[in-house]
Amino acid sequence: MSNIISCKSLHNPDRDIIMSNRLTDTFLNVLIIAGSRIAKTEDQKRLIVWLAEKDQSAVGEGTVGFDIREMPWNVETFEKDKAFMLKTIRHALNKKHWEKLGYEPNEKYVFPSLEQFAELIGEFEADDIRPKERTEWLEAAEEDDPINNGFPVCPEHKALLSIYGCQICRN
Ligand SMILES: [Zn+2]
């Protein structure tokens, strides 16, 4: 089983990132541990929490693929948030905070996926945003959702929590 990250607005299925379930967990672990520490605004924290919701231990293995257009991009702050996401990927490629993960991700597998993700995000433009995705995601969040409660982090990983908890502790 696998998960696929794509961006359909680029109209090129060859660019899809196809990852095994285990690799998907690692890919998300390294993005979340890096991005949680440098997210400054609520919109940037939301992007990381949204990724943390792709928690296979909660929602099922092989069910967390997504299209980049589904992410909760804010049209108004897009350029800054895109730069934030690219910086998060760069930090992951620089193995930032990997010593906190409790295991050593295999660069051979996770680096190519991170590089592909950087390419997809790099080419993603404000015109590609579907504002409804963000609105609906925000509206669906319950009162006790971390995004409505000051964005708590895991004490162990300093990772932003989703409704399911810490994606790194759980996967
Ligand atoms: Zn944790």
Image (cartoon, rainbow, N blue to C red):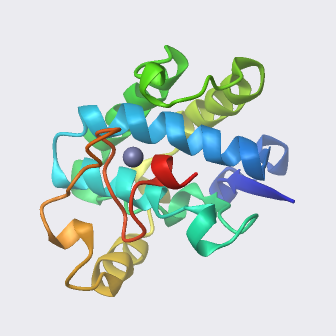
Residue under the point 45% across and 56% down: 52
Q: Nearer the viewer, residue 121 or 147?
A: 147
Between 144 and 12, the residue placed more toward the observer is 144
Q: Position of residue 43 (x, y in %)?
A: 24, 54
Residue at 69% across, 53% down: 6
Residue at image point 61% right, 65% down: 57
Instruction: Give coordinates of residue 4: x percent, y percent.
Output: 75, 55
Residue placed furthest toward the left: 150
Quadrant occupied by the N terminus: bottom right
Q: Which residue is more in the foreground, 91 or 79? A: 91
* Depicted 44 relative to depicted 138: above or below: above
Q: Residue at the top extreme?
A: 94
Say above or below: 25 vs 109. Answer: below
Q: Is residue 15 above or below residue 43?
A: above
Quarter location, residue 165: bottom left
> What x and y, as percent, mark residue 124?
52, 45
In this rendering, position of residue 86 left or right of residue 110: left
Foreground: 100 or 33?
A: 100
The total number of labels drawn is 0
Task: Give left or right: position of 115 versus 86.
Answer: right
Whole-percent x, y for residue 138 in the image:
29, 77
In the image, taking residue 54 as reference, residue 25 lies left or right, namely right
Q: Residue at the location (72% across, 25% down)?
A: 112
